[in-house]
């Protein structure tokens, strides 16, 4: 069984059904190998075809929005938490 193809299959389906949605693929959360990649499905498929892919994965799919998305790639987890819940310190 080719695990790379199994991991890329959901991205190909999303690319076909929801080509304008932004995704985040997170790998090995809470370990020293933690990795998060964001983009549209076609961009992530291209990246993962050239990079080794293994471990536990989490896939997030953006909602349907007509508004431009904020670039969160430079935010720390604390910044993200504060934006999502401004009443935290």
Image (cartoon, rainbow, N blue to C red):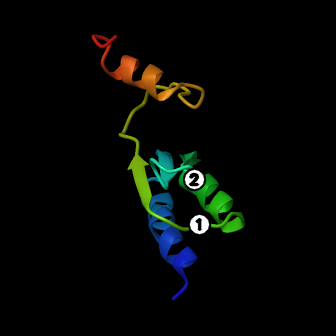
Q: Residue furthest left?
A: 87
Report the disc number at residue 33.
Answer: 2
Report the disc number at residue 53.
Answer: 1
On the image, which quarter does residue 17 sit in? Answer: bottom left
* Secondary structure of residue under mark 2: loop
* Secondary structure of residue under mark 1: loop
Counting labels gives: 2
Residue placed most toward the observer, 30 or 77? 30
Identify whether 59 is placed above or below 13.
above
Q: Residue at x 50, y 46 (%)?
A: 20
Residue placed most toward the observer, 86 or 61? 86
Mark 2 → mark 1, Cα distance in angstroms: 11 Å
Residue 69 shows up from this direction: no
Query: On the rendered image, what quadrant is the C terminus found in?
Result: top left
Q: Residue at x 27, y 10 (%)?
A: 87
Q: Position of residue 26 (x, y in %)?
A: 49, 51
Residue placed most toward the observer, 3 or 44? 3
On the image, which quarter does residue 66 sit in? Answer: top left
Asked whether the residues under the numbered discs 2 and 1 touch, taking CB atoms below 8 Å apart as contact, a structural biologist would say: no
Q: Position of residue 34 (x, y in %)?
A: 54, 49
Q: Residue furthest bottom?
A: 1
Q: Earlier in the sequence, mark 2 or mark 1?
A: 2
Q: Residue at x 48, y 47 (%)?
A: 23
Q: Nearer the viewer, mark 2 or mark 1?
A: 2
Identify whether 87 is placed above or below 24.
above
Instruction: Specify few, some or many for label 2: CA neighbours under 10 Å numbering under 14, 14-19, or 20 or more.
Output: few
Q: Residue at x 52, y 26 (%)?
A: 76
Q: Residue furthest front?
A: 32
Instruction: Specify few, some or many for label 1: CA neighbours under 10 Å numbering under 14, 14-19, or 20 or more.
Output: some
Q: Position of residue 65 (x, y in %)?
A: 39, 33
């Amino acid at each position: 069984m080719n695990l790379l193809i199994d991991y890329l299959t959901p991205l190909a389906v999303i690319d076909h059904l929801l080509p304008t949605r932004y995704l985040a693929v997170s790998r090995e959360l809470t370990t020293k190998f933690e990795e998060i990649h964001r983009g549209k499905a076609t961009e992530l498929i291209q990246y993962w075809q050239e990079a080794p892919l293994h471990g536990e994965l989490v896939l997030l799919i953006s909602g349907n929005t007509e508004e431009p998305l904020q670039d969160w790639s430079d935010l720390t987890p604390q910044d993200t938490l504060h934006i999502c819940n401004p009443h935290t310190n």
